Amino acid sequence: MRSLDTDYLVVGAGAMGMAFTDALIDHADVRVTLVDRRYAAGGHWQDAYPFVQLHQASLFYGVASTVLGTGAVQQQGPETGLQERARRAEIQAYFDDILYRRFLGTGRVTFLSASEYTSDGPAHFVTSRVSGERIQVNVRRRLVDATYLSPTIPATTPPPFGVADGARVVAVHELPDVVDTPSDYVIAGTGKTATDAIIWLLGNGVEPDRILWVRPRDPWMLNRALVQPDPAVAFGLAADTMTAAADATSLDDLFLRLEAEGVMLRVDREVVPTMAKAPTLATWELELLRSIERVVRLGHIRQVTTAELVLDRGTVPLAPDSLVVHCAASGLQYPPMVPIWEPVAIRLQSIRAGFPCFGAALAGYVEATRDDDRERNRVCPPNVYPNSTAEWALMQARGAIATATFGAEPDIAAWANGCALNPARVDPSRRDDPAVQRAAARLAEWRERGLARLTALANDSEG
Ligand SMILES: Cc1cc2nc3c(=O)[nH]c(=O)nc-3n(C[C@H](O)[C@H](O)[C@H](O)COP(=O)(O)OP(=O)(O)OC[C@H]3O[C@@H](n4cnc5c(N)ncnc54)[C@H](O)[C@@H]3O)c2cc1C
């Protein structure tokens, strides 16, 4: 068997593996082997639905060395004034460029594409899905698990319900390929993918009453206008969160206060959501989503037949030729939080609240610049991806503490402030801006009380 020696073996060339590798090779003279079972870099974006876009600004996504997109503000369309958001093709091209031009161009990175990583005790193997060749990889320094939070998506996950013979069900990425126009579109799913599918259908002229939306839960979403690469906006959002938390009597009360401040959005004002993955949403999208009146709230779909949907708490008849669109993969994953640095591997996770690319890049920088794993884990505690309102509160609390901890290290603070992926970075030209100073002062005033209450709300709910 052929063998290969490397300092780091990074498993997963998705956004997190790419962001880690980028920061690592920029700050340490090391050799990295990157492996992915997909042919190209970029992870789930390779199989995403064609009309997907980042839900946040392009500047916040990708690797630290190279900005994704142009950093421009949109000049036309319903999001005029908000930062541009990359589409699938742009994200794919970006990661391709980072991999081939930047990483391989250094001569210090090897990419093993279309290859499966496996281990046998301490031994590491990579098997090509194309040739079948198995290579033993001797890792001098660290194994890096950049798959721990890899999302599941409809294109690669079967629908979580039965499909009877003759029933029409497609995964969301197949939607643009549908040729015989269905009578009704049934959207199965509640999260960002489902909302994207509805907005795409409406944008393509489908009347709202031809869309049936199966919503087992209702989601809270963040107002996109408040998640922008502008320190006055970023500090303002953090201050709003802490202010709302400080006096919140419950998790629901916290989210309703945030809604009153224009931070959180919900589709149906009659229902208090329980789901808080909290992707961003623009207000023009919210208005479109509110035009869907045929909403089914009978739990999850169990079975689709040619004539009806069978759900947890009842059945709904389907018009002949209805098309069910599978948007019901769980997306974000929720494995237990573990220390990022463990003897067996570095397991990439978020560190701030959200912004996984920043977390992975920060871990790459810290790996390169510190020798002791205890110290690395101290400055980079892991964070959760949120699903429930309690997890959202926990994520905010952990993120605030983590930001203060790594921000207290002068070199990390300087690196983070030069990194576009960091939503709290303050460009030197904005330091004396009164709007930034006002927002920062408001955050400082409310931070302690808000943080204590966020922690209590998250813990109460756990108990
Ligand atoms: C539709 C959608 C939109 C999103 N939009 C945003 C956004 O706008 N902003 C944001 O910050 N986050 C967003 N996210 C959140 C998402 O978590 C991030 O995109 C995240 O960066 C995912 O990257 P990843 O590297 O963790 O996982 P992945 O992209 O899944 O990459 C992991 C890679 O590991 C490979 N792999 C796994 N196991 C093995 C193995 N044994 N051997 C070899 N290879 C293996 C997989 O093939 C995969 O390519 C979005 C998620 C989805 C689903």
Image (cartoon, rainbow, N blue to C red):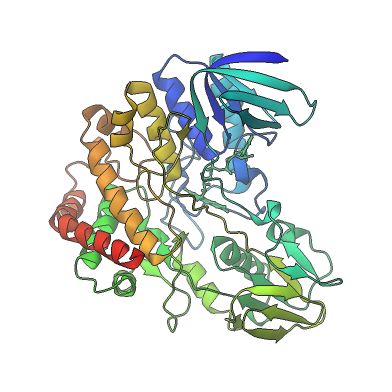
Image position, residue 28 (x, y; %): 41, 17
- In the rendered view, tell whether residue 281 sits above or below residue 52: below
In the rendered image, residue 375, in percent from the top left (x then y), is placed at: 28, 29
Give the quarter of the image for residue 363.
top left
Residue nearest the viewer, comparing 149 with 444: 149
Left or right: residue 438 versus residue 35 is: left
Q: Is residue 69 visible?
A: yes
Work out whether 146 lies above or below 288. above
Quadrant holding the C terminus: bottom left
Splitting the image into 4 quarters, where does residue 41 fall?
A: top right
Q: Is residue 168 left or right of residue 78?
A: right
Quick check: 346 left or right of 160?
Answer: left
Viewer can see residue 71: no
Vertical relation: 19 (above or below) 53: above
Residue plotted at (68% across, 29% down) = 113
| Residue 423 found in image quarter | top left
Residue drawn at point x = 48 percent, y = 30 percent? 344
